[in-house]
Image (cartoon, rainbow, N blue to C red):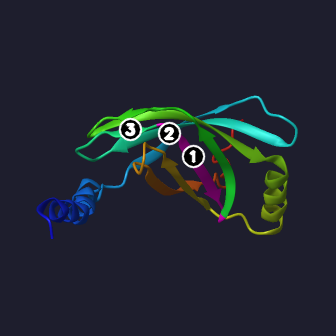
């Protein structure tokens, strides 16, 4: 085998292995809802602006040029949204990004009717999942879970006022 062919063959075998090292396992991003603002709604849809705080616990910045999210509550999709926002989350840093989400009013009515027929849970579990879309194969998925405590029945007033 000719020496230049051998070099090309070796490079073709080693290049993908070296490329895999560049995609070292990243620590998962930490994502939380930092705020919610109402947006103008249309028809049977309710729109909100979610402010997401994204923390990068890794030693490399994360470049992104789009965000997509899905918010589940009570084990069903509650809201979803996308944004073409672009930016960089610095290494060991954080960023707040805005994502507009849409909620079906028909789905809200359906859930309200379901909750009226069933005992109200003390807590509602939620799951936020999404992707920071990056260049080439640089997309990073994230997931966040939690519980929201629902207010309980009002406690009876103690002590009488005269």
Residue 92 falls left or right of residue 49: left
The percent position of residue 141, horizontal first and vertical second, equals 45, 54
Residue 54 falls left or right of residue 66: left
* Element carrying mark 1: strand
> Outermost residue toward the front?
2
Task: Please report the bounds of the magenta region as a residue range.
Answer: 65-75
| Above or below: residue 114 compared with residue 91 | below
What residue does disc 3 label? 63
Q: Is residue 153 visible?
A: no
Q: Residue at x 45, y 33 (%)?
A: 96
Pick the residue in front: 118 or 127. Answer: 127
What residue does disc 2 label? 52
Residue 16 falls left or right of residue 124: left
What residue does disc 1 label? 68
Looking at the rendered image, the quarter that the N terminus falls into is bottom left
- Alpha carbon of mark 1 to alpha carbon of mark 2: how far? 12 Å
Tag 1: Cα neighbours inside 10 Å, few (<14), some, or many (≥20)?
A: some
**Viewer-nearest of discs 2 and 3:** 3
Decide which of tag 1 and tag 3 comes sooner along the chain.
Answer: 3
- Alpha carbon of mark 2 to alpha carbon of mark 3: how far? 16 Å
| Above or below: residue 108 compared with residue 5 | above
Q: Residue at x 47, y 56 (%)?
A: 143
| Above or below: residue 62 compared with residue 17 | above
**Viewer-nearest of discs 1 and 2:** 1
Q: Residue at x 25, y 53 (%)?
A: 22
The percent position of residue 53, horizontal first and vertical second, equals 44, 39
The percent position of residue 162, horizontal first and vertical second, equals 72, 35
- Alpha carbon of mark 1 to alpha carbon of mark 3: how far? 15 Å
- Magenta segment's dominant SS is strand
Decide which of tag 2 and tag 3 comes sooner along the chain.
Answer: 2
């Amino acid at each position: 085998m000719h020496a230049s062919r051998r070099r090309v063959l070796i490079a073709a075998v080693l290049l993908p292995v070296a490329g895999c090292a560049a995609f070292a396992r990243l620590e998962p991003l930490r994502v939380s809802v930092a705020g919610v603002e109402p947006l103008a709604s249309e028809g049977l849809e309710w729109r909100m602006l979610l402010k997401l705080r994204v923390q990068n616990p890794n030693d490399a910045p994360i470049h992104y040029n789009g965000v997509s999210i899905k918010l589940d509550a009570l084990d069903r999709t509650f809201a979803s949204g996308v944004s073409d926002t672009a930016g960089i989350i610095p290494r060991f840093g954080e960023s707040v990004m805005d994502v507009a989400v849409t909620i079906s009013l028909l789905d809200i009515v359906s859930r309200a009717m379901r909750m009226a027929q069933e005992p109200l849970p003390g807590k509602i579990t939620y799951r936020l999942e999404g992707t920071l879309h990056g260049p080439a194969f640089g997309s990073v998925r994230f997931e966040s879970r939690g519980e929201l405590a629902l207010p309980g029945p009002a406690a009876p007033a103690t002590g009488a006022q005269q």
